[in-house]
Amino acid sequence: MSDLIDAVAVQEMMNDYYTLTGIGIGIIDRNGTVLVGTGWQDICVSFHRAHPESCRHCLESDLELSGSITPGTFKAYRCKNNMWDIATPIMLGDRHIGTIFLGQFLYDDEVPDYDLFRAQARRYGYDETAYLTALDRVPRWSRETVRTAMSYYSKLARLISSLTFSNALLTDSLKLGATSTHLLGQQMLAMENIDRCLSLDPTTPVPPAAAEPVHDDRSPVPEQDVMRRFLRGWSLIQERIRTSRALERAKQEWEQTFDAVPDLIAIIDTNHKILRVNRAMARKCGTTPSDLVGRHCFEVMHGGTCPPAFCLHNQVLTAPAEYSGEIHEPLLNGIYDVTVSPLYHPDGSVRASVHVARDITRRKRAEQERERLEEQVRHAERLHAVGTLAGGVAHDFNNILAVITGYGHIVQTGLPADHPQQDNLRMIMEAAGRAAHLTRDLLLFSRKNPANRQPLDLSMILHRAERFLDRLIGTNISLVIVSEPRDPLLVYGDEQQLGQVIMNLATNARDAMPDGGMISIGIEEVELTADEAVALGLVSRGRYARITVSDSGVGISPDRLTSIFDPFYTTKEPGKGTGLGLSIVYGIIKSHDGSIQAASTPGSGTTFTMHLPVCGDQTLSAELGHLP
């Protein structure tokens, strides 16, 4: 059989098939010689066929599967080693000359009996842990997958049978062709002699007659039989050409399939050299597949001079099995889910490995974005719950303060101005005033303070706040105002509350720069897409006013940045802040259907970015001409 098929070409084709499907094959002749083999399981090579007794079970399985199979069909058999195998015959005419084996597998609807396999390991002296690990690597296929694979292998067997039969007939035909050509020549020479005898004088000597055409058994062959067999040989040659072309087309189809796969695929030998890559891998490396063949994989994929510590190929060479991992590779500009599987020689030793890398960069970024949004929602829910609690407490506390300040005022006015208790009463009233201011801050944070909403021009609000900011921040800090809009930038809001936002952020910036620095406040109009709006926690896309307040202060560490909007949280020294300034800013911006984000680098300052929806009715700009 080895003389009748191109085993090397079939091996290459089935290597590609195994790369794409993970389904192996064995083509074995009737003498037990392995002609083609790929995808052989470690449990068979390293265990079952390595022990004399269990190897006998394998041979029994081969004999059982090799006998009495109808051509064009396949037969399943569960061997005494408790592995499934399926076979289909290869025929030469009506003679069985070889068998295609699917290889060891388990059905996915069967649960392996691990106690049975443990008993087998003890019976044959296997390393139990290694044996069960090899069992876990045995492929689990659905019955539909097995039927489809064997349908393909049955067709392949018929194709190989046809090709083998054509090769055998072609060999005979070529021998016959040589004999037929000789015989036809002899007959033509005989005819020439006859013609010469008829045209010459009877005394002319006649050349000796040609030998009679003979078969291999030396019996005479009629001329018509010679021609018939010669033409039959010629038709077989044509059939061989058609079969060869069909095989070439099949090979091209597999190559096209290999190159059409969007995942990055590379086949690496035991010396870390690239044997083959698909077009997707070559494109990712910015070259062609042929340019990558022969180069070291760690040079191409990792830009190094030796394999990295996480090299999955090294693991395959050390302990043959399938390995997978998630790898971030800057050289290939992405995050990849990589699976590496061994390729075996017919004797069971590893000859190479197949790397399949799927680009999961977008998925990972989407997961990170989802986690960020989920954290944003949790933070907003937490602040909302605290705000609801703070609003309720503030209302109740306001009622208590009203009683304290009311009776304090009565006592204060009922006593002479020079009464010794007047100083004590004044301290009580001042403390009550501070408590009232604190409750107002809590109500602002909880968004329960009544607001006077109207169309406002942010440029005008910023201009009015600038006069107070100069006195607030001191002479050692420079203030830069950047206002890009030429036309009024309208938002619907409470002027006092929005002014307080600017004042609170400027105050925070000043306290972050005890040795002086710069505060920059800017406003601009932007158009946000739906994705950008969602990322900022806004309800819809559209036009927004962007307000930025930046400082060149000490900055905020990342672990503290996530808590700066929480009420009563402060980075200042004890006694230098209530921890409500940024909470109030957050509450005001949220009550205006806006969003606020903070970005900071320790030692380089902090930037607060706010977005407020722009008024949709631009006719409101006319009203701004009447605002003071």
Image: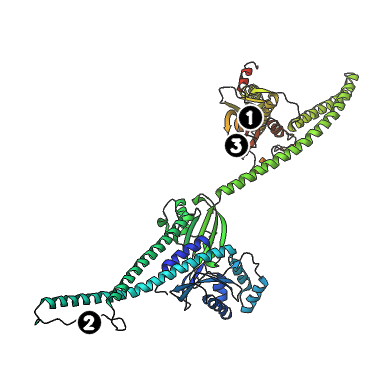
x and y, in percent, of residue 16 in the image:
47, 62
Circles 1 and 3: CB atoms closer than 8 Å:
no
Q: Secondary structure at mark 3?
A: helix
Q: Residues within 10 Å of mark 1 (few under 14, many from 20)?
A: many
Q: Residue type at mark 1?
A: Pro
Q: Residue type at mark 3?
A: Ala
Q: Nearer the viewer, residue 479 or 492?
A: 492
Compare marks 2 and 1 and give the one earlier in the sequence: 2
Q: Quadrant of the C terminus?
A: top right
Q: Residues within 10 Å of mark 2 (few under 14, many from 20)?
A: few
Q: Mark 1 = which residue?
A: 613
Q: Nearer the viewer, residue 339 or 495?
A: 339
Q: Along the horizontal axis of the image, is 351 left or right of 415?
A: left
Separation of marks 1 and 3 at Cα, in angstroms: 14 Å
Quarter of image, res 531: top right
Quarter of image, res 473: top right
Q: Along the horizontal axis of the image, is 232 left or right of 399?
A: left
User: Residue 211 has which mark?
Assistant: 2
Separation of marks 2 and 3 at Cα, in angstroms: 97 Å
Residue 42 appears anywhere in the view? yes
x and y, in percent, of residue 587 in the image:
71, 33
Circles 2 and 3: CB atoms closer than 8 Å:
no
**Which residue corresponds to the image point at 29% horizontal and 83% vertical from the top-left?**
219
Q: Mark 3 = which residue?
A: 530
**Which residue corresponds to the image point at 87% horizontal and 24% vertical from the top-left?**
406
Separation of marks 2 and 1 at Cα, in angstroms: 110 Å
